[in-house]
Amino acid sequence: MTQPQDLPKDAAHRLEELEHGLFTSDLSVNEFLLVKEAGFHPLGFVMGSSIYHIGLQTRKWGESQELTKLTEAMYTARELAMNRMEEEAQALGADGVVGVRLDVNYYEWGSDSAEFIAFGTAVKAEDGTSHLNALGKPFTSDLSGQDFWTLMQTGHVPQGLVMGTCVYHIAHRKFTQALGSVGQNVELPNFTQALYEARELAMTRMQDEAGLLKASGIVGVRLEEKSHQWGSHTIEFLALGTAVTKTTGTVTLPKPITIISLDN
Amino acid sequence: MSSPPTADPRAEMLQGARSLAEAPPPGEARGITSDLSVDEALLLHSAGWEPVDLVCGVAVVSVPVGVWNWGQGTISAATDAHNTAVESAARQLRGECTKVHGHGVVGVRVQVEVRPHHIDVELVGTAVQPVAGTDGGGTPFVSDLSARDFILLKGAGWMPVGLAFGACFVYAPRRSAGVAMKQKTQNVELTNFTEAMYTARESAMERMQRSALDAGGQGVVQVRVTEGPMSFARHAVGFTAWGTAVRLVADSHQFLRPELVLPLDDAVVTFEAQSLRGK
Amino acid sequence: MSDGSPDLPEAAVRRLESNSFSSGLSVPDFAACLDLGLQPVALVQGFCVMQWGWYGAGSGYMRGASPYFGGQQYPGAYAETYRCPHGFVSTEHRTWGQNIEQPWVEAAWAQGYGSAYARMLEEAALHGAHGAIGVVDRVSHLADTGTTEFHFLGTAVTVEGGPPPAGGTPWSTYLAGQRLTKSIEAGFMPVAVVAALASVRVWAYCMTEYLMEGARTWGGPIGPQEVEQVSKAHMAVRQLARKHVREQLAGDALHGASIQVEKRELAAGDEVIDCTLRGNRMRRFKEFDEVPAPRPTVRLT
C-alpha cells in the first residue's frame, strides 16, 4: 500500500482496514448492482476535506469585475479536498471514484472560512485492466451508479470530475443611470457582457482541466450560481462536469422498451 | 395491429434533418399547439390520437358585497357565483375546442381563486382528436385526467364525458354566549357544527354527482375535495369537489393485464431541464 | 449575425476554439443522443440583460396608453372599449374603460428573449453545429438592479452525415434524450424553440370597478354576475399569446407548450395581465406511422 502524503493518521488506519476485503460505500443496492454490472467492484467510501479561509477583496461599487482572489480561494480549496479524496482512493489501489459529491459547509466559529468536502466511492475494475487517467490518478466522476453503467455502454469512460469557477462582482447601477432610462425596457449591454464573461470564464477553466486529462469531452455539465456570504451582487459561477474519453465508440445500449407505469 | 417495423433511429434522424434543410415550412393555415408533455403526446400518438390545440376558458364572476358577513346556513350567493364561474369557463373551453374540431379536452388544469369580491376560474387544456379525423359529433368532453390516464381509460373501454364539479360555501354556526359558557368544561359533540359542515360537504358532493349525471356519466374518477375557511373571512367555510365523469363505451370492461417489472433505478430518471442549473 | 461574431465575448471565442466537446446533457440523454447519430460539440449559451420597469400607475411612460390621455395607437393591437350605461358625468365616475394590448411591452420581451436565443444559436453555428438540444431558458430578475436577464443554455450537436442547416441557422429544441428519439420516431423533427409574451392592460370602467369591488345594490339586489371586461381580458391575453406564437410557427406544430400567466392588480379591476407561452416548434417529416404501444407495468417493490 502506498502511503498517502497529507492525510491524517486515522484516515490511513481506516483505509488499512478496508484493504482486508471489507468494502464500504454509499451506493444504494441498485447502484451497487449496476457498478458490478459495469465490471467494477467497490473498494471503499473515500473523502477529502479542507477548511479554507477566504480572503477579502475590495469591489468597486459601480463596476463589474472578476474577484480573482476569491476565485482562487474557491478553486484551490475544492482542489485540495478533491486531491485528498483521490489520495485516499489511490491508497486503496482504486481505478476511480464514482458518485462524487462536492459540498461547502460554513461554521459559526469560522468567519470568512468554509469547509470544502468531497465524498465518493472508490471502485476497481474486476478484470484487472487499469482505468487510471492521463495523469496516472484514479478517475473521479459525479455520476450515479446508473449513469456510470449507462456511460460505459456508450463506449466512453470517465476521466475526472472537472470544474471551473469564477467569482464575479456585478456592478450596482448609479441612481442617475437608472433614472435616465426610466420607462424604457432596453438592453443593458454592460450587464449582458459581464454575465457572459463570468460564465464563460468558469466554463473555459473547466474545459482547460478536461484538456489536461486529454479528455474527448465533458458530459453532464452543470452551471451553479451561488452568492455564498458575499451579498447578492457577488456571485460565484461554478461549472462542473465529468470529462470522458471515447474507447470503442460503439453504443451497446439496448433499445429501451416503452412502458406505461400503473404505479402512483 | 401489426407491430410496425422498428426503424433505425439514425436513419430517421437523418431523414428529419434533411427535410428541415431542404423542404420549405408547410405553411398551412394553422399548426398544432399542445401543452402535453412529449411523453403524453407520444402516448396519444401510440393510441392513434393527436393533440389539436391549446384551449382555455376563463371566467371572473363577481360576488355581491356583504355575502361573507355573518349569517346562517349556506352562503348561496357565493355558491352560485362559483357554479356560474365554472360553468362559464367550461362553456368557453368547450367552445374553443369545437372551433378547432377537437373531440374533447384532456389534461385540464383547474385553477379557482375565491376572492372577497369575485371568483376567478381558469381552465387550460389540450384539445385532442383521433388521427383518423372522424367528426366529433356532439359536445366535446372535458376532463382533468392527464393524456396518460385518458389513454389508459380508453384502452379499458371507458371514455370521459365531462368535468364533474360542485361547491358549497357555509357560515360556521355560532353558539350563544350562554351555551358556549356551559360547554366550556364539558366533553360534548357540537352537533350544530357537525351538522353544518356535514351538510355543506354533502351538498358539494351532491352537486358534483348531479353534474356528472347530467353529462351522462356512469361514474366519477379522481375526485378531489378541498375544504377550509376563506383567508379573508375565517367564519366562512368553502367546500369544493372535482372529478372527471366517465362512462363505459365498450361492451364490457377491457382488462389491461399489466406486466410486473422490477426497476433498478432509484428514482424515475427523467429529463429535467432545471437540473442543468444545479440545485 | 454573421462572420466575426462581434457579439461574443473573448472568453467564449477562446472556449469555442478548443477541440473537445462539452455538453450539458445528463448521461442517459448523452447515450440517447449518440444513439441518434448526434455528436455533441459544445455547451452553448446566450444572454441578454434588459432594463425592466412595470409601468405602474403614475409612471410617465403609460401616457399614450391610457384612454384618459388619448395618444399613440397601435394598429392591429387588441383593444376593446366599455362605456358607462348610466349616463353619469362626474370626475369620480369612470365613464369608460378599455382593455388594451401593450405591444411595447411585448416587443421589449421579444427583443430580450430573441437576442439571447440568437446569441446561443450564433455560438452553436460557430461550431459548425446543426442543432441545439436540451435547451433551457430562464427569465429572471438580477439582484436588485431593476433588470431582467434572459438566459439560454443548450448543447450544440452535429448530425452524422447530415446536411448543414437551412440558411446556416441551427435547429433547436427543449428536448433531449429518449424524448427526442421518440419524437423523431413519431415523425417530428425539431425546428426551433419558440416563445411569446402577451400583455394586456385593463382600465376598468364603472361597472367593472363596482363588480370587482363587490357589487353594490343599485336600486335592487343583484346576484352573482360575470365581470365581462376582466373575463374577456383574460381570454384575450391567452389568445394573443397563442396568436404571437402561431405567427412564428409557419404551419409547424408546437409541442410540449407551457403557458404561464402573471397578473398585477393595480386597483379594483385595474390590472396588467401577462401571458407567456413557449414550446417546441416541430415539423412533421413523414406520414403518421404507428409507434408501438407502451406496455402497462406495475412495479414489483
Image: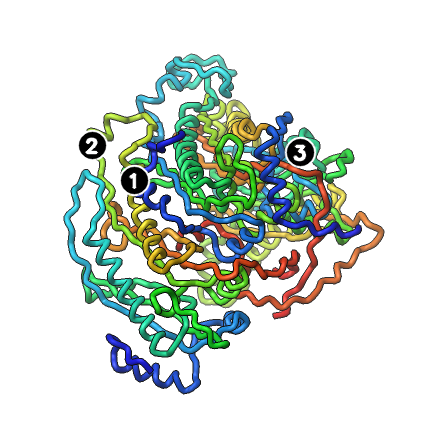
Q: Chain of mark 2?
A: A
Q: Quote the CA–CA distance across marks 2 and 1.
A: 30 Å
Residue nearer the viewer, B117 or C101: C101
Q: Quote the CA–CA distance across marks 3 and 1.
A: 51 Å
Q: What is the number of the mark on residue C10? A: 1
The quadrant of the picture occupied by the N terminus of chain C is: top left
Q: Which residue is mark 3?
A: B97
Q: How far across and how far down the image is residue C70, in percent?
A: 39, 13
Q: What residue is drawn where x is 27% and y is 50%?
A: A166
Q: How far across and how far down the image is residue B4, in percent?
A: 74, 50
Q: Which residue is mark 2?
A: A175
Residue nearer the viewer, C164 or A142: C164
* Amino acid type at mark 3: Cys
Question: Is residue C172 at all visible to an observer of this figure?
Answer: yes
The quadrant of the picture occupied by the C terminus of chain C is: bottom right
Answer with left or right where residue C265 lies relative to residue B119.
left
Q: Are marks 2 and 3 on the same chain?
A: no
Q: How far across and how far down the image is residue B50, in percent?
A: 68, 40
* Amino acid type at mark 1: Glu
Secondary structure category for the residue under label 1: helix
* Amino acid type at mark 2: Phe
Q: What residue is drawn where x is 28% and y is 37%?
A: A191
Q: Are marks 2 and 1 on the same chain?
A: no
Q: Is residue C89 above or below residue C296?
A: above
Q: How far across and how far down the image is residue C257, in percent?
A: 55, 40
Q: Chain of mark 3?
A: B
Numbered marks: total: 3
Q: Are marks 3 and 1 on the same chain?
A: no
